[in-house]
Each structure stands twice: as structure tokens, then as C-alpha cells.
């Protein structure tokens, strides 16, 4: 019979292990091997300068008699590290061997080292498959990745279980507006706006659950704070006493996230000229009606609608920054008219809240109705169709405990933290009304 | 001006902190407060037995003069812990106070403690919003959550960055088959079958990336191993020498995952009668053509097609279990005909591989083409339309380093690990040809 071939020997490794650019200082005077992309190049005739970009940063290398490829080519450099005060990071590599791993065949459509988001944002997004390599672009995405890691780790430590719920659904939790439609084997289906119902059901299983997954809003309007597809950080917890438990959890969670960013992302914040906010042990809380009165009386701003308008959000945040030094404020006790039908009622208001951060709402949360009769009453009060919500309401016949939760839009939090004006730059490949590629 | 109201006092906490059922043994003879669901009940006239289910397990409680609510009601019990050899976990709670937090208003449509997946699987899935509370059901989902946690943690430790890529796309990476169609503001769009192109692009940014997100296959056929929406654990790494680097990574990753399951999920495996497999330091590897010959010569099974058929997968796994004690085998060097156009060619075969686990393919991976000219040649060889793949091929003009990766279907791995016959029970709310709810 056939014998399996001898186990294939591992491919010949270069004897010199790879060094990351951020570690050059540990190898002063030594030979190193670098791999990365040719970020920038300069040829002064007899001498050539190459800036190599790897996952950890950039490094300058210098050699002679080299024919440098186009920028963005993948390259490998072997050379000796020398301290050099003017080089990025304080070290330079004197090139002994320069190897092209994969040559760029044409100049990049945008100059990666010189990109400015404000100059031509649409062009930058058209060429996102290359422009995303930029140092600022990737800094934003790395910060977001660390936010998500901290979200996981904090909730794991508090006994939460991660869930994965369907994004193809038969109806929207909010009643049907702004849904993308889908043909599902001949049936009408939709993309989920939120995992709301499913995370509530899963409270019946794991008591405390979270999900990190995309959600969809078919909103036609193009603003700097909305995306049609975004990453939602969703939390739901059972056996609570009130929405205070939910806000307290979010308060602790945000402190963990900012702590992790402080440990791991100071370079990224420095690059983007942003500062990591402190999170008070007790984020200020103010009922919506008092918040509306406050911005009117203190700032002379009359607030329309039932909620806070963007200017009122900005002013309220300014107030708490000035008076309590907090970049964060919970606006609580939203009236029913500004909340979905599943918000837990308390007289004329609900146990729903928003969290404002530096002038913008970054999360909605609250306690949910957990009793069937109360839910059906609310559906009638909101003049919704009980039939179309039967799939939602059914589970509440079976002893759902008091529960509540919240959702954070990952891109919006990232953008606001970093001072990025348009939330689209906080997503690798954003989708908006006019953008389905790349 | 209005002053914000005094900070609301936290709701009155019960003086007795909550105890989880799994910790009863630490409170022998003490008063405890339990919260959870009424899993089962028995009324013997003078005495009532209540089985309380919480996130950590179940506990028996006994009292008298109680009028127990319907099962699945949310309840709270205060009582004294007594050792009791016949009770689950060896302890019983003598009820002093029994409180209904939220009463079930009708009997659950399935008897949670008595459910058997095999008896009536479709009914179990119809009522999934309650049946998912079952001990075996949630054990499967908890194992999956731990697999996902280990996936994150291992890759973080190896310097990978998590990414979030679009699920609404303008074309499929595999060329267009089996795609769900979507109306995107009047344009034709699709749900992504895989993040293939996007994770490759992101190798140009972070070198090593992973994603945990749903993917979509509009496959009409209903089998026990396919889902139309599933959770894909995707990995891509740059600056590799060959697909061996990718397999070695996956080998280490699987060892980490199984190690974590051994630490955290032994109770779940015991409940489901399953064992956690060892992962060899070097999972056996055999080229596809040799694997085909082996199953023919050793087992007399003639393999059709270009790949392995399900019976050949089973026999090959049997061979490695018998001869090397390995539940895992990498089948390497797939021929082009059994691989997508982006697989890195090597003569008549590719650097693509599959990983078999206990008789079933749980992952596909390999080195990808990273050079533009080679990619265009492959597109022509596969008789695909270069125009329709222009969005894919464009990035390869810009110095993509050698790279490769793999994807693991989370539900399939979970099901196979736990001996669950139908992959739908390894997903909270599965979607199949006929199932769009709950």
C-alpha cells in the first residue's frame, strides 16, 4: 500500500530571526532582519534611503547602489542597527541586503505617507484597499480592536457569555423602519437592526450575555455620525434591580476599556493628537427632563422634540466637563415617546438612558419590560400591531427575569475618542448610501 | 436654574448576596439566596420540591406549604444549605423564603428537563426561544463561546489584530454562486460568503489578522453539516514561507482551544458524553493524492471526484486514529480543480489544505496567490471573468506579501467535538432553507 510521504521538512528559515521596527533599540550595533512595506524612498544618487513600515511602526534604512522598487512593495532588509538621532525612533539600519518580496507594479493611487483625510475624503475611501495602510488609518482600527478586546475581557470577568445571533431575520425589533430587505429562498427577510430580541432570549439561558457583531440600518441620509453597517457591542444582563445596575456595569466596563487603551494605545492616541479620557468612578446621571431644562437655563438653548438635539447634547456635555470634569454623562428616565415599546415604563417616563461622550450619544440602554402583560399593554399604547410582534412577545410568557442592557456603536466610540470627524474612517470598509465597494 | 436631582440612591440590595448553585458546597449549613428559573417541581402534598436552574447549574430546594408557580418562572429562594447525598451536586436548600420574580403564564411548549434532540428536532427548533434553555442546549453554546474565547486569546498572543469587514458586498469572492441577494438602495448587493478578500487586504495593514463574524451561503440543500448562516473564525497571516506556516499556526491554535476547553468545559463535555481530543504537537499531514490512494488500498474504497468524499474523509480519519492516535489530519496539496482561483499553485496542485477532525472537514486553508500576474493567469486558467473580479485583483498590484490563512466553522467544530449529529443544535438560532424564525 501507499505510505504517506515523509513529513515535509519546514521551509528553510533565514538564520536571522525577524526583528520588528519598534524593537530596533534593543539591537543597537547588531545585524537584524526586517520585513514590511516600502513606506517611502529617496535616492540621492550614491545613497538610497528606504523607510520600511511593519505592523509595529516605521524604520529608516540606508544603503548604496540600490535600485529601490515602487513604494508599497513588500520588502526584506538585512542590515546593522546604528543609533541615529534624526531617524524615526532614533535608530537607522545600514542595509547589507535588500530583497523585494513582492513588487508593487504601479504607483499607489494615493501617497500613503502624505494622506490627509480632510483633503479628499471620497477619494481616500474609493482607494480604501490601499489607503487603509496609512499610519493614521490603521491607528484608528487598532484602537477599535483594543476597545473590542477590552469589551470581551471585562465582560468575561463579570461572568458574561458571548452569543452569536441571526442577522437574517423575519422582522425588525423596532417595528420595521430602516430595514434592508433580502430574498431568503423566496421569502421576504431583513437584515437585523440589532440583536435586541435575541439577546433578551439568551438572558433566559446564560443570564448575562454579550455579542460583537455587525448590525444594519437602511438609513438614506448621509451624516458624519451614521453608517449603514456598523459593529455593535451589545450587552444584556438578567436579575437586575433597575437600570442603575446596567449603568453601573457600563461605568465599570468603560473604565476597563480606557485602562486598556492607556496601556496599549498611547502611541496611536499621540499620532492622532487625541487624549484618553478618565472615567469617573460614578459617571454623572441626570434625568432627561432636567437635562433639557438645564441647557435652556444655563445656555439659553431651546430644545426641540422629546429628546436632546445635537446642540443640547454638546452643551450638556460641556456642562459636565466644566462642573465635574467628566467627559461622560448618563441621561436617564427618557419619556416613552423617545423610547421603543420594550423600554420598562415608570409613570410617564421609562427606565431607558443614553450615554453622552464629549457631546455625542454613544450608547442607548435601559431596563426592558420582562412581563408579558406589561409588554402587550405597551404594544397597544405604542399603537403597534401585536400580530407582527408575536415572534417577539412569545418568549415573555415564560418567566423572563428582570433584565436590561445596552449597545455601543464601536465606530462611533472610536471616532469620538480619536477626534475623527467622520465615523466612516473608524471602519475598515464603510458602507453608506453611495458606497458598496471596496 | 434647575439643579440636577440628587444622585439616585442605588436600589435597596438584599442584605444576603446571591450565591450560584455550583457554589452551594462552600455554604454548607449557611443561609443563601439563589436566583434562577424553576427547572422542575414536585408537590408531595405536605412538602414541595423545586429544582432551580441558574447559569452555573441546578440545585434542589425543599419546602412546605408552598404554591409553586409553573416551571420556567424566574424565582428567588432564600434558605439553608444542607448536605444531601441524593440531591444534584450533593446539597439541598431548605426553603425559608420563596419568591416569584416573574411567573410563567403558561406551560412551556417543550419540557425543558426532558428534551431529547433526536425525538422531534423540528419542534425543538420551532420553540428554540425556550428550548435553548435546556442544559444540553446551553452546554453546546457555552463550549462554542469558549472556543471563540480561546481563538481570540491565542491569536492575540501571537500578534494578530482583530478586524471587522463588510458583510454587504458587491460580488462574491468565489465567483457568485450560492449568494443571498440584497437590495442596497436600489443596487444589487450580496451577503458575504467569506471575508476572504478583505482579510487579505488587511494583511497589508496589520500583517496578521483574524475575524469572528457570520458568513452566508444560500445553499438549497438541507444536510446535517450545513447552515445558511454560520459563525466563521477567519485567520490570515502575511510574510509566510509557505502553507506550512499556516498549518503550524492552526496546530498551535487548536492545542490552545482544547487546552481551554479542558480547563473550563469538562462539565459540559461530561453532560454530553463527549471527550476533549488531544492535539498532537505535529498533526499528521498527507497530500490529497496519497490520501486517495491510501483509502483505496487500505479500505477498498474508490474515491470519486477530485477531492475526498465523506466516506473517504471518515476512513482517512480512522486510519490516523488507529496508526497515530490522532483525531486530526491535514490533507495537503489539493489539485487546482478542487480549489478556488486564489489558491497558490505549485505545478498541478496548490498550497491549499483541508483539516479533517474525526471524519469530517472542519477547515480549509492554504497559501494564497500574492502576485498580480500570477493571479491574472489563474483567473484565466479557471475561465473566470477578469472584469467581475477586478475589485478583488486590484490590491495585488500593490506589493502584497506572501500570505495564507484558514477559516473554521464554529458550529461544525462545536458539533463534532460534542458528538452532536446536526450542526443546527450548535447554533442558538439556526437558519436553514425552511427556517427563518425564531
Image: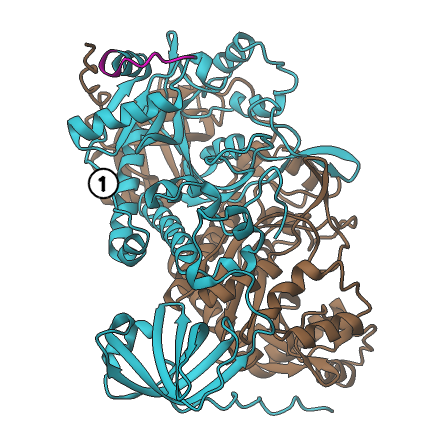
Chain colours: A cyan, B brown
Categorize mark 1 by other alpha carbons within 10 Å: few (<14), some (14-19), many (20+). some
**Quadrant position of residue B361:** bottom right
Image coordinates for residue A91, horizontal then vertical, percent = 26, 77
Residue A356 in the image, given as x and y percentages of width and height: 33, 29
In the rendered image, residue B97, in percent from the top left (x then y), is placed at 29, 21
The relative height of residue B5 versus residue B415 in the rendered view (above or below) is above
Q: In this view of the protein, which residue sits in the foreground, A166 or A295?
A: A295
Question: Which residue is located at x 64 percent, y 90 percent?
Answer: A5
Q: Is residue B132 magenta?
A: no
Q: Which residue is painted at 19% across and 35% down in the image?
A: A281
In the rendered image, the vertical position of residue A230 relative to residue B47, given as above or below = below
Residue A220 image point, x, y percent:
60, 30
Q: Is residue B177 above or below residue A180?
A: below
Residue name at image x 42 percent, y 86 percent: A45
Q: Name the one closer to the observer, A58 or A281.
A: A58
To which residue does mark 1 refer? B27
Chain letter belonging to callout 1: B
Describe the element under mark 1 as helix, strand or loop.
helix
Q: Which residues are magenta?
A: A297-304
Quadrant for the C terminus of chain B in the image:
top right
Relative horizontal placement of residue B354, taking residue A37 as reference (left or right): right
Q: Nearer the viewer, residue B63 or A61?
A: A61
Amino acid at each position: 500500500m501507499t505510505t504517506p510521504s515523509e513529513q515535509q521538512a519546514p521551509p528553510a528559515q533565514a538564520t536571522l530571526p525577524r526583528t520588528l521596527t519598534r524593537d530596533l533599540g534593543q539591537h543597537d550595533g547588531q545585524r537584524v532582519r526586517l520585513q514590511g512595506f516600502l513606506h517611502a524612498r529617496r535616492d540621492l544618487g550614491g545613497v538610497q534611503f528606504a523607510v520600511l513600515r511593519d505592523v509595529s511602526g516605521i524604520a529608516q534604512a540606508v544603503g548604496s547602489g540600490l535600485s529601490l522598487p515602487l513604494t508599497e512593495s513588500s520588502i526584506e532588509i538585512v542590515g546593522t542597527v546604528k543609533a541615529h538621532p534624526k531617524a524615526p525612533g532614533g535608530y537607522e539600519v545600514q542595509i547589507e541586503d535588500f530583497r523585494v518580496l513582492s513588487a508593487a507594479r504601479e504607483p499607489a493611487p494615493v501617497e500613503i505617507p502624505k494622506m490627509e483625510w480632510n483633503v479628499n475624503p471620497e477619494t481616500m475611501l474609493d482607494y480604501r484597499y490601499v489607503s487603509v495602510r496609512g499610519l493614521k488609518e490603521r491607528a484608528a482600527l487598532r484602537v477599535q480592536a483594543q476597545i473590542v478586546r477590552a469589551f470581551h475581557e471585562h465582560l468575561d470577568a463579570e461572568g458574561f457569555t458571548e452569543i452569536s445571533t441571526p442577522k437574517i431575520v423575519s422582522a425588525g425589533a423596532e417595528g420595521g423602519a430602516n430595514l434592508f430587505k433580502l430574498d431568503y429562498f423566496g421569502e421576504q427577510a431583513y437584515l437585523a437592526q440589532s440583536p435586541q430580541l435575541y439577546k433578551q432570549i439568551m438572558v433566559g439561558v446564560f443570564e448575562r450575555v454579550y455579542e460583537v457583531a455587525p448590525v444594519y440600518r437602511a438609513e438614506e441620509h448621509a451624516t458624519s455620525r451614521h453608517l449603514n453597517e456598523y459593529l455593535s457591542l451589545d450587552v444584556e444582563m438578567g436579575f437586575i434591580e433597575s437600570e442603575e445596575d446596567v449603568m453601573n456595569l457600563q461605568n465599570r466596563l468603560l473604565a476597563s476599556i480606557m485602562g486598556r487603551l492607556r496601556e496599549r494605545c498611547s502611541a496611536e492616541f499621540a499620532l492622532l493628537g487625541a487624549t484618553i479620557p478618565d472615567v469617573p468612578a460614578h459617571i454623572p446621571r441626570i434625568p432627561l427632563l432636567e437635562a433639557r431644562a438645564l441647557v435652556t437655563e444655563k445656555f439659553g438653548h431651546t430644545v426641540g422634540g422629546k429628546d436632546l438635539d445635537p446642540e443640547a447634547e454638546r452643551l450638556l456635555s460641556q456642562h459636565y466637563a466644566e462642573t465635574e470634569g467628566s467627559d461622560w454623562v448618563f441621561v436617564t428616565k427618557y419619556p416613552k415617546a423617545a423610547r421603543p415599546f420594550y423600554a420598562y415604563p415608570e409613570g410617564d417616563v421609562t427606565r431607558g438612558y443614553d450615554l453622552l461622550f464629549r457631546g455625542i450619544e454613544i450608547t442607548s440602554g435601559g431596563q426592558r419590560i420582562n412581563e408579558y402583560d406589561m409588554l402587550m399593554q405597551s404594544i397597544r399604547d405604542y399603537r403597534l400591531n401585536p400580530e407582527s410582534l408575536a415572534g417577539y412577545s412569545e418568549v415573555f410568557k415564560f418567566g423572563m427575569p428582570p433584565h436590561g442592557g445596552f449597545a455601543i456603536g464601536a465606530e462611533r466610540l472610536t471616532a469620538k475618542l480619536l477626534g475623527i470627524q467622520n465615523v466612516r474612517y473608524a471602519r475598515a470598509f464603510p458602507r453608506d448610501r453611495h458606497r458598496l465597494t471596496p
